[in-house]
Image: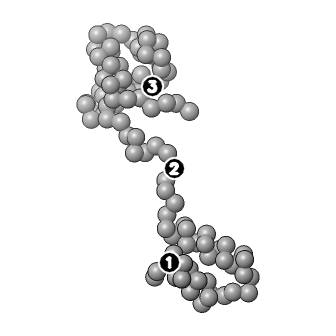
């Protein structure tokens, strides 16, 4: 997996490109892939300065949603207590303050 490219690195790529360097020499001098240098230049050409903004908020896993947590908890209760049915499982989840319709 590739590593994130900071805003300063992106500006440096654009500055080198404006000086006339090709993608290959830019990628070698900054120790990054050819495709990364080209993609950043293309974004800059298409979107201007806003194309250089990093999107770190898109990195990593999404947090577990509350709905998913309730679902998993209900499955676990059903697994532990196979004779419990519909009215009892939501009651137990409410007691644990996980479920509030």
Residue placed most toward the observer, 99 or 43: 99
Element carrying mark 2: loop
Of tags 1 and 3, the one toward the viewer is 1
* Residue 88 image point, x, y percent: 62, 88
Q: Is residue 7 left or right of residue 60?
A: left
Q: Position of residue 40 (x, y in %)?
A: 37, 27
Q: Is residue 41 left or right of residue 59?
A: left
Camera sees residue 24: no
**Which residue sits furthest bottom?**
87
Q: Which numbered disc flags the more N-terminal residue, 3 or 2?
A: 3
Q: Secondary structure at mark 3?
A: helix
- In the figure, 31 relative to 61: above or below? above
Q: Which labelled disc corresponds to residue 61? A: 2
> Is 71 rendered above or below residue 60?
below
Marked residue nearer the N-terminal end (2 or 1): 2
Sequence-wise, the earlier of marks 1 and 3 is: 3
Q: Nearer the viewer, residue 26 or 87?
A: 87
Between marks 3 and 2, how big is the CA–CA gap? 23 Å
Residue 97: numbered disc: 1
How far apart in space, not on screen, are marks 2 and 1 (Cα)? 25 Å
Which quadrant is the N terminus positioned in?
A: top right
Q: Which residue is painted at 46% across and 43% down in the image?
A: 59
Q: Residue at x 66, y 77 (%)?
A: 77
Instruction: Please name the residue that numbered disc 3 is placed on.
Output: 36
């Amino acid at each position: 997996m590739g590593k994130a490219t900071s805003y300063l690195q992106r500006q440096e790529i654009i500055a080198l490109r404006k000086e006339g360097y090709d993608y290959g020499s830019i990628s070698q001098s900054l120790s990054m892939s050819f495709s990364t240098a080209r993609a950043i230049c293309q974004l800059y050409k298409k979107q201007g300065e806003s194309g250089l903004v990093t999107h770190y908020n898109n990195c990593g896993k999404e947090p577990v949603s509350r709905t998913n947590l309730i679902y998993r908890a209900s499955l676990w209760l059903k697994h532990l207590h196979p004779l419990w049915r519909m009215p009892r499982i939501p009651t137990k989840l409410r007691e644990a303050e996980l479920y509030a319709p």
